[in-house]
Image (cartoon, rainbow, N blue to C red):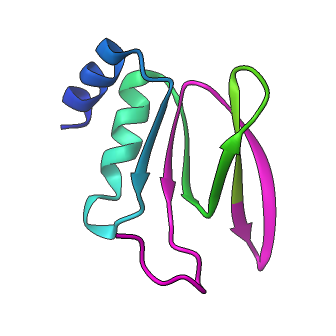
Amino acid sequence: TGEALAVVGRKLGAELVVALADTATAILPAAVAAHLDAAYLSNVEGLTAGDAGAVVAEKRAGGVVRSLRVPLPAVVTLVAHPDEGPLE
């Protein structure tokens, strides 16, 4: 399934694939990233446009939110903010 989705992403010219963080399908975004030879970052709380060829991801680690520059192409999974409830 990861390979099939990567083929579609490649045909569409996708540089950024965003998925919801879900324990039932947790391996799927990583598999897509591997087949696209793309960067992979999981459990991202925020995502904004960065400079050319990158996005900026906010990720919580040890209670601290860090901003990370992620080069494109990339696959990221988003989690709900604790104050906003689950993503739908």
Which residue does the image show at 62% across and 64% down from the upper left?
Answer: 45
State whether residue 65 is above or below residue 49: below
Quadrant including the C terminus: bottom left
Which residue does the image show at 25% across and 31% down from the upper left?
Answer: 5
| Residue nearest the viewer, comparing 38 with 85 | 85
State whether residue 63 is above or below residue 66: below
Q: Quadrant of residue 65?
A: bottom right
Horizontally, residue 62 falls left or right of residue 18, namely: right
Residue 87 position within the rendered picture, expressed as x and y whole percent measured from the top left? 41, 71
| Residue nearest the viewer, comparing 36 with 15 | 15
Which residue does the image show at 25% across and 22% down from the upper left?
Answer: 8
Residue 68 position within the rendered picture, expressed as x and y whole percent measured from the top left? 77, 47
Residue 41 position within the rendered picture, expressed as x and y whole percent measured from the top left? 57, 48
State whether residue 48 is above or below residue 46: above
Q: Quadrant of residue 84?
A: bottom right
Q: In which quarter of the image is residue 46?
A: bottom right
Tell me where the magenta segment starts and ends, as one range.
59-88
| Residue nearest the viewer, comparing 10 with 36 | 10
In the image, residue 74 lies in the stretch drawn in magenta: yes
